[in-house]
Image (cartoon, coloured by chain):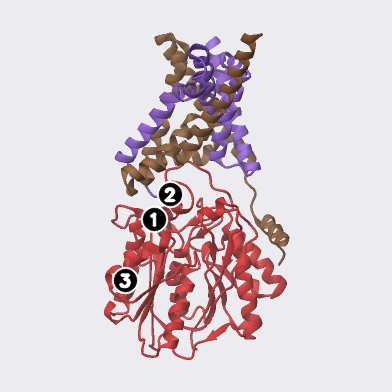
Chain colours: A purple, B brown, C red
Amino acid sequence: MQAIYEIILAALMGGALCTVAQLLIDLTSLTPARILVLYVSLGVLVYAVGLYDLLLPIFGMGISIPLIGFGAAIGRGVRETIISEGAIGILSGGLSAAAAGVTLALIMGLLSALIFKPRSKRM
Amino acid sequence: MEANEKKRLIKKHSPHTRVLKNAVMSFIFGSIICGSGQIIFRLLQSYIGDARASATLVTLIFIFIGSALTGFGVFDRIARHAGAGTLVPVTGFSNAVTSEAMDSESEGTVLGVGSKIFTVAGPVILFGVASGVVYGIIFFAARLIAQML
Amino acid sequence: MNRIIKLKRTVSFCSVAAVGGYEERRGPLGERFDFCDMTDTFGQDTFERAEGEMGKLALNTALTKANLSHNELSLLVAGDLQNQCVGTSLGLSGFGVPFLGVYGACSTCTEALLVLSAMMEAHADMRYGAAVTTSHNSAAERQFRTPIEYGGQRAPSAQWTSTAGGAFILGRDEREPRITELMVGRIVDGGTTDGSNMGGAMSFAAADTIISYFRESGASITDFDAIVTGDLGAVGSDILRELLSRELPGSERLHTDCGLMLYDMKNSDVHSGASGCGTSAATLAAHFIPEMREKKYRRILFLSTGALMSPQSLLQKQNIAGIAPLIRIECSQ
């Protein structure tokens, strides 16, 4: 029962975050690329004020898979590295926390470019 | 003709974006992705144990799926209906990276793919890192002050 | 000064050819194309080269239909949508014909026919010339918008860049129909920075040209069977008809738009219609010229419409400008 409850909460949160983005795209002049940037920065902010660690146990992947989670990972990396290594963490914490995701995305991009060719669009 | 009159005419004759339909579709796709992510997360966690590592793995799995669907030419067909439902989860980030890379392969692997791959990834990484640095400076300063007091 | 150039010499359509891709074949004009490549690649490894190949194919088809060799062409006027017009210049490099590359965004088809006609008017010994125009959906998406496999949504006012091309051989023969008048368009501010609403931005230029033409020529709207615009799509056509009904009552009923003819507007996900300079070129070659030869139209005004902008100008929030050159095409009887 607990598991189903968790899954529903994750789905609701993920869906809600996507809908807010969709409304921003449709009702304001924000472009999709700006939405991605906005959500990443928002993720850092949400982590910085301590909200992310409150929401994560409740909504799980619903808040972690959207790019908010990517931003929060950067925020957490900065915070934890500052605590363990001092001021250098301001510079080194963010990228090292995001390293796995960024590296996988880039490597997948490179491999896809070598393997696949773009196909012309269909209506 | 005055600029305002032109704006008025364009507005009058342009069809409206189907805001409600788009909102519903983005919600459906967003919840499917995050709900299934939660299922994968639970499976991984029962196997690995560590919650943080499992969460990272889930993110990586969706980056992989987004990229693979882009490579096989399926992602854009889904995203046409899903809108922000596939954009906001990491699948959107990985689609942007992969589609730019595939597109620019004809201009060379080094300068084509090497530079264009960052067209959308660049801003996301840059402003993510920049926000992190701003937060880091504030957090570090606050800690310093707290230690002095 | 009267802006209308009346041709004293004969400039007639000797032959025309239309080529297209997969979506164009499925459209209402599909069967009237001379050739459609269902892969959209035209046997090339990049879409940019495919566009060049499309122009080459269209010109070769038109030459064959006119029973001419490329050596008999005195001039080639052509353009496309790629940076520096390179699709055309590389695709047509093998013909060895004196070449003028023209760029008028989606107005290129009329612009090329206009320049070629004016040259043939000026030089009596120029017997044959060719005008070629192409656009390729995938090359244009890459150039102006997003990568091909990028998962985005198109706005309802957005148009679909056609993968299409047209080639026209103009000559001195007493063949029908003929080009009899030319009018160069003015650059008209489109009133919007929205790259997804080019039809709306171009409609004001089309209205400017049509209204100026009737004012300066003194012609009556009843002289014409159709006023054909290039690729205004649904939004631009609606605006143009409203403007025409204000300034030239009755003329709005003569208006048709190539952008509304190329695809099935009801049953396909085309949004506001077709765009791209191949749209008006292919529609003229596959529909209007054949219909004029069958005497279904006697006299038309043909004006392709162009949205003048670049990816940079859009990012810098500059207004899109419109342009609409005009040619008058008619049968003598």
**Residue carrying label 1:** C22
Quadrant of the rendered image containing residue B40: top left
- Mark 1 crowdedness (10 Å alpha carbons): few <14, some 14-19, many ≥20: many
**For this rendering, which residue is in front, C201 or C23?**
C201
x%, y% of residue C143?
44, 53
Q: Secondary structure at mark 1?
A: helix
Badge 3 marks a residue whose secondary structure is helix
- Whether tag 1 and tag 2 are in contact, CB under 8 A, the answer is yes
Q: Chain of mark 1?
A: C
- Few, some or many C-alpha atoms within 10 Å of disc 2 (few <14, some 14-19, many ≥20)? few
> Which residue is found at the position 71% from the left and 58% from the top?
B8
Q: CA distance from mark 2 to mark 3?
A: 26 Å
- In this view, the residue in front, C184 or B129, is B129
Residue B11, label in figure:
none
Q: Is residue C89 visible?
A: yes
Q: Is residue B110 left or right of residue C245?
A: left
From what the image shows, is residue C57 above or below residue C40? below
Q: Are both tags, 2 and 3, on one chain?
A: no
Q: Which mark is residue A122?
A: 2
Q: Which residue is mark 3?
A: C61
Local secondary structure at mark 2: loop
How far apart marks 1 and 2 lie (CA) works out to: 8 Å
